[in-house]
Amino acid sequence: MHVLIGVVSRQGPDKNPLVKRLLESIQKVDPGLPAVVQIEVGAEFTKGEKRQRLFTAARSRGCAYACVLEDDTETLQAGWLAQMISAALSVDGAGIVNPLESRDGLTIVNATAKGRVIEASLCFGFCMLYSLAWEPTQDPRITFLDDLAMSLQCRAKGYRLVICGRAMIRHSKEPFLRDSKPPWEQKDRDRWGEGNAYYNEEVFTAQRVREAAILLQDYGDMAEMVMPPELLKPAAEFLWRRDHPTITGRYEPPKPDPPLGRVATMGEIAQVAGPA
């Protein structure tokens, strides 16, 4: 089975040591891997554009799957891709598969899935194995919440999200603790480049809210269930103000419907209905 392994980055291995590390790790742990590796680079293109190009390349090669990795990842074990494909084949309608995630190569972030294949409500973008059967398409309106958008698109088409607990990928930016800080506090800015909106607090926050509002509008309750809590209310307010431009005042989320109370008995219903 042909699989395309795609890497998304601003720069290639000649200029980005993380891409070089990833490629070397793939060759080291799986030297005979029956897959084509393609790197999509270019600071002038969005991450979404690069992902879409990888989907196109995979389809043109007749691949059934495309595994898209971010540049700050590293493979750790032989058979990692085979395990992910096996997980996809073992679940009817599997659309996206995530491996286990490790920051340091030892500690597992989602350890409850270790050794298991389980369904999830959300997959994360560090490493996603896409089945091309559901024709994944990158939404050009989405930049920062792209993994959430792809997860929702997959589910909305009736496919499943899966975590493969038999494969693990290291996901770390050097130093990896940098990602525990908000983007505007990060001094290492090689990920997207100095001056990118990602590092501007006001622009970053506003863009995330706009994207969250798009996903709420497009996917409704499905999006609400997996939306980051800090974005849910601002996104709902964004939509409310857009739809009610002449109304001023403070936005309040809609209140839940009151409880229905006691349910009538069959005898009471028959009494009200009268004779048949």
Image (cartoon, grey):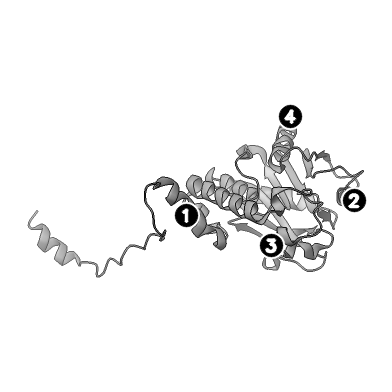
Residues at badges 4 and 1 in contact (C-beta under 8 Å)? Answer: no
Q: Is residue 10 visible?
A: yes
Closer to the observer: label 1 or label 2? 1
Q: Position of residue 219 (x, y in %)?
A: 50, 47
Q: Is residue 114 left or right of residue 142?
A: right
Closer to the chain start, of discs 2 and 4, is 2
Residue 236, disc: 1
Could you say whether the residue bearing mark 4 is in a helix, strand or loop? Answer: helix
Helix, strand or loop status at disc 3: loop
- Rendered image: mark on residue 60: 4
Q: Is tag 1's residue or tag 2's residue first in the polypeptide sequence?
A: 2
Q: Earlier in the sequence, mark 3 or mark 4?
A: 4
Badge 1 crowding class, 10 Å Cα cut-off, few under 14, some 14 to 19, many 20 or more, is many
| Label 3: few (<14), some (14–19) or many (≥20) C-alpha neighbours in 10 Å | some
The residue that mark 3 highlights is 116
Label disc, if present, on residue 198 of the rendered structure: none
Distance, label 2 to label 4, CA atoms, is 29 Å
Query: Is 275 above or below relative to 150?
Result: below
Q: Which residue is mark 2?
A: 17
Q: Is residue 264 left or right of residue 108?
A: left
Quadrant location of the N terminus in the rendered image: top right
Counting other residues with Cα less than 10 Å from the Cα at mark 4, is it few (<14), some (14-19), or many (20 or more)? Answer: few
For the view shown, which residue lies furthest in the left direction?
275
Relative to 233, 41 lies left or right: right
Of labels 4 and 1, the one closer to you: 1
Q: Residue at x 50, y 53 (%)?
A: 222
Q: Quadrant of residue 185?
A: bottom right
Tell me the element at label 2: helix
Earlier along the polypeptide chain: callout 3 or callout 2? 2
